[in-house]
Amino acid sequence: MKQFVRFLLVGLFNTGFGYCIIFFFMYAIKFSPEISNVLGYAIALAGSYVLNRKFTFESNKKRTGEIFKFLVVFSIAYSANFAFLVFLIHIVNFNKGLSQILAGVLYVGVSFFMNKYYVFKAPISS
């Protein structure tokens, strides 16, 4: 439970940062919702790794393998996010801003479980 709370705190910070970037590109620069979403998640990715590695999961593993796994998890979680975003905006014709938030909720769920049980999985103690 402690890890999930920390994950949520990191996520809240990083999500706020990411959404500021997304909405800046979407509303101030007038980029499409899709391009804005890609840019927001890409920029926030590095911060997410560092904060989750140190604060959430307190990992001491080698960074090289961990970074690769983190990128795999990000790719899967982000793909789910992006597909849901496109579905909500273009199929359901849902509000673009709310669609960003709902797609983000899906991203958080997928990301936490995969990071906990795949990327930062604690070694089994003997």
Image (spheres, rainbow, N blue to C red):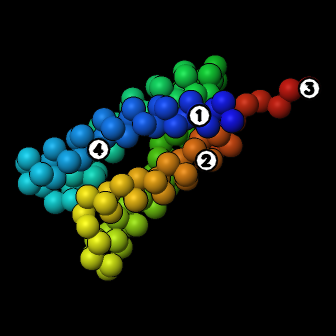
Q: Quadrant of residue 13?
A: top left
Q: Earlier in the sequence, mark 1 or mark 2?
A: 1
Question: At 47% from the left edge and 43% from the top edge, which residue is drawn?
Answer: 71
Quadrant including the C terminus = top right
Q: Earlier in the sequence, mark 2 or mark 3?
A: 2
Question: Residue 111, how many percent across, how many down?
Answer: 53, 47
Q: CA distance from mark 4 to mark 1?
A: 20 Å
Q: How many marks?
A: 4
Q: Residue furthest bottom?
A: 91
Q: Amino acid at mark 4?
A: Tyr
Residue drawn at 24 percent across, 40 percent down: 20
Q: Nearer the viewer, residue 24 or 40?
A: 24
Q: Which residue is mark 1?
A: 5
Which amino acid type corresponds to the residue marked 2 in the rendered image?
A: Met
Relative placement, left or right, of 115 versus 83 is right
Mark closer to the observer (2, 3): 2
Circle 4 residues within 10 Å: few <14, some 14–19, many ≥20: many
Q: Between disc 3 and disc 1, whose residue precedes? A: 1
Which of the numbered marks, if any, corresponds to residue 126? Answer: 3
Question: Which residue is label 2 attached to?
Answer: 114
Q: Residue at x 62, y 28 (%)?
A: 57
Q: In this figure, which residue is indicated by the disc labeled 4?
A: 19
Q: Residue furthest left?
A: 29
